[in-house]
Amino acid sequence: MNNQKLFREAYELLPGGVNSPVRAFKAVGGNPIVLTKGRGCRVWDADGREYIDFLASWGPLILGHSHPKVVKAVRKEVEQGMSYGLTNPHEVRLAKLVVEMVPSVEKVRFVNSGTEATMSAVRLARGITGRKLILKFDGCYHGHYDSLLVSAGSGVATFGIPGTPGIPDEIASLTLVIPYNDLEALRNVFEKHGNDIACAIVEPVAGNMGVVPPQKGFLKELRKLTKDYGALLIFDEVITGFRLAKGGAQELFSVEPDLTCLGKVLGGGMPVGAYGGRKELMERVAPEGDIYQAGTLAGNPVAMVSGVETLKELRDTEPYDELEGKMNLLKEGVGSILEDKGIPFRINQIGSMMTVFFTESEVKDFGTAKTSDTEMFSKFFKALLGRGVLIPPSQFEAWFVSTAHEQRDLEEALSRIEDAVKSL
Ligand SMILES: *Cc1c(COP(=O)(O)O)cnc(C)c1O
């Protein structure tokens, strides 16, 4: 079956033909593709077309597709058994790696997705502090949990409005939303509501409004204010964890949160999330403590070994400088191609993640990200796809490189991109 035929059937059976909205290509238009195979830095669709892949399954595949060590371990574990519903040894192995690699984590609970991780961390923070309010930053995405799927209304420090029908105003109004990287709004919101804030949750490097790094002092001030007011600081490192450094953004910026949410790279392509932190905080989680959270398939052995092999490889090879070098090459190549064509753009890059924004203004928060020309992005995306380069089908997402992208792959990608941009 080919792409078109499969999608026609998918539309009948799945809302929008997909199990996660962005996959439907609604933000860029055109026909979505169905992927059937991935090897290294490349994927193939149901029509047999090949693409150099910078989507990387939205971030998990830091070692590329089907890394031999990961595949071998998964295969072996599947033969052994797929799920027990009681503790298996690989949960302990993965927990050890997480605690060793992530600076602020002493104890960890595994869940099945990033959404579950943030939802559970927020519950824990509310349980510990006995407070109701949550502070989040406009444009940061923390999964689709009600309290976190909230957008900013107008004004600077504001109570959130539901990001979708189905979330009661009463729930959204417990979430405060302020702009990312805005120190003044940050100080104001703590001055006004600080004693009622259970936690502040932040992407320490934003990846879901496109890549937006924290400006100097932003994370440090956030750490200081949360501490001063007795609120917990949650780093949502679902993208940045194990990607920007062994210990994620908290290692890179030397700021230690109280709780950390993990996902994506953690499972090496299998559905795994986690939340963790200092012992005295995590000891409040049931059954050791009184704050309930559970999961039938949490700590699934097949998913755990995928994570174990992925983290071991990252710990032992520390490929972070190499990954950054690769992304630099891509960034500079794409930059000069766009410049030659006279298309205005800004590229935000940190380590192995970047976003090409089609705007002339510096992008430092969601407001400035939204100055991007999404029509231009959509043309760019389609031209790339037509020439065998897969990037995320939205202006407001990150491109990723993996250890499987070799220099010659990047050169090939750049020559395809040059061709694509010429056609615009
Ligand atoms: C992807 C993502 C999530 C949600 O993870 P899911 O596994 O899709 O539920 C949460 N936070 C951040 C920062 C993410 O990038």
Image (cartoon, rainbow, N blue to C red):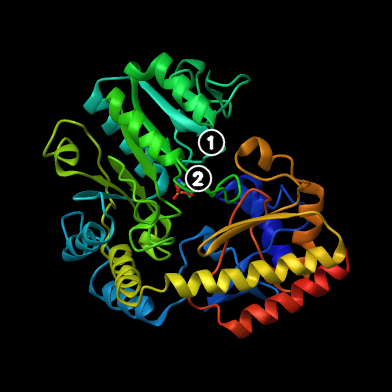
Q: Quadrant of the N terminus?
A: bottom right
Q: Residues within 10 Å of mark 1 (few under 14, many from 20)?
A: many
Along the line of sight, the residue nearer the viewer: 90 or 323: 323
Horizontally, residue 106 falls left or right of residue 360, namely left
Whether residue 164 is situated above or below residue 212 in the rendered picture: above
Q: What residue does disc 2 label?
A: 214
The image shows residue 119 at horizontal and vertical percentages of 37, 36
Dot 1 lies on which element? loop
- The circle drawn on residue 180 is 1
Kindly indicate the quadrant of the structure image that contains residue 83: bottom left
The image shows residue 351 at horizontal and vertical percentages of 50, 63
Pointers 1 and 2 in contact (C-beta within 8 Å): yes
The image shows residue 272 at horizontal and vertical percentages of 35, 56
For the residue marked with disc 2, what is the amino acid?
Pro
Along the line of sight, the residue nearer the viewer: 92 or 246: 246
**Seen from this angle, which residue lies furthest bottom?**
408
Q: Earlier in the sequence, mark 1 or mark 2?
A: 1
